Image (tube, rainbow, N blue to C red):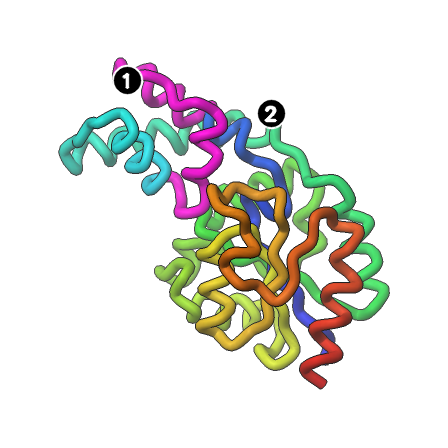
Amino acid sequence: MPQTVVFDLDGTLVDTAPNLVEALNSVFAREQLPPVAYDQGRTMIGGGARRMIESGLRVAGRAVAPADLDRMFADFIAYYSAHIADRSRPFPGLEAALDRLAQDGCRFAICTNKLERLSRLLLDTLGLAARFEAVCGQDTFGIQKPNPDILIRTIAAAGGSPDRAVMVGDSGTDIATARAAGIPVIAVDFGYTDRPVAEFGPDRVIGHFRDLPEAVRALAAVRI
């Protein structure tokens, strides 16, 4: 069975922070709240839009009623959907790394806490969608990372097996998810975590996608 390489999306495959922080600040402007600084906003990414809004509200020292949070979430999704790839781009070397791994017989999937339809819209807009056998978000199965079931079910949706899989992510959440699922994990060090990603204990850390194929091969060899 081919190796299945499962990627996180935001901060791992695609640098989406410019559009996500912009969407957050668009909502905050409507609510007459101060904007979130870009460097701080980057670290709020990874738990989905609602959690990003909640993190921004904590920074602003504001608490809102559930109905207000629902309205802000809807406004965020509407703005982000309309501007989803205005400034978001794949990280350098991604497509060349996917080409090399595909030559090795790997298949690819995405396991993200982003909504599935937004994930697919982003990938379609960037011309990446056809590369992935499965794209699973927080609403695909009604669960999200760090629950390991979302990763296991993503692998199955891609036609893979957990004993022939590796996770690639940028955060402690990604690493915890992979660990709980019993799957090796590679971390990229250019993502959105506010701590050095090596502190979370991944099996490998890479600083550029040129290093991904060798890292995948090394972890696959250990499992044989």
Say whether marks 2 and 1 touch (CB < 8 Å). Answer: no
When the figure is inspected, residue 21 is found, relative to residue 219, above or below; the finding is above
Q: Nearer the viewer, residue 205 or 71?
A: 205
Q: Is residue 29 magenta?
A: yes
Question: Residue at coordinates 54% horizontally, 44% vertically from top-left?
Answer: 10
Q: Residue at x 74, y 57 (%)?
A: 212
What amino acid type should be assigned to the residue bearing mark 2?
A: Asp
Q: Is residue 136 above or below residue 196?
A: below
Q: Position of residue 2 (x, y in %)?
A: 73, 75
- Say whether residue 99 is left or right of residue 147: right
In-front residue for pair 202/170: 202
Label 1 secondary element: loop
- Label 2 neighbourhood size at 10 Å, few (<14), some (14-19), many (20+)? few
Name the residue at the left extreme: 65
Magenta part of the chain: 22-49
Helix, strand or loop at mark 2 = loop
Quadrant including the C terminus: bottom right
Q: Which residue corresponds to the image point at 73% horizontal and 64% vertical from the top-left?
A: 215
Is residue 15 shown left or right of residue 174? right
The residue identified by callout 1 is 33
Q: Position of residue 30 (x, y in %)?
A: 30, 16
Q: Residue furthest bottom?
A: 224
Q: Position of residue 198 (x, y in %)?
A: 57, 56
Q: Nearer the viewer, residue 172 or 199?
A: 199
Q: Which residue is mark 2?
A: 86
Crowding near the residue tagged with mark 1, few <14, some 14–19, many ≥20 C-alpha atoms within 10 Å: some
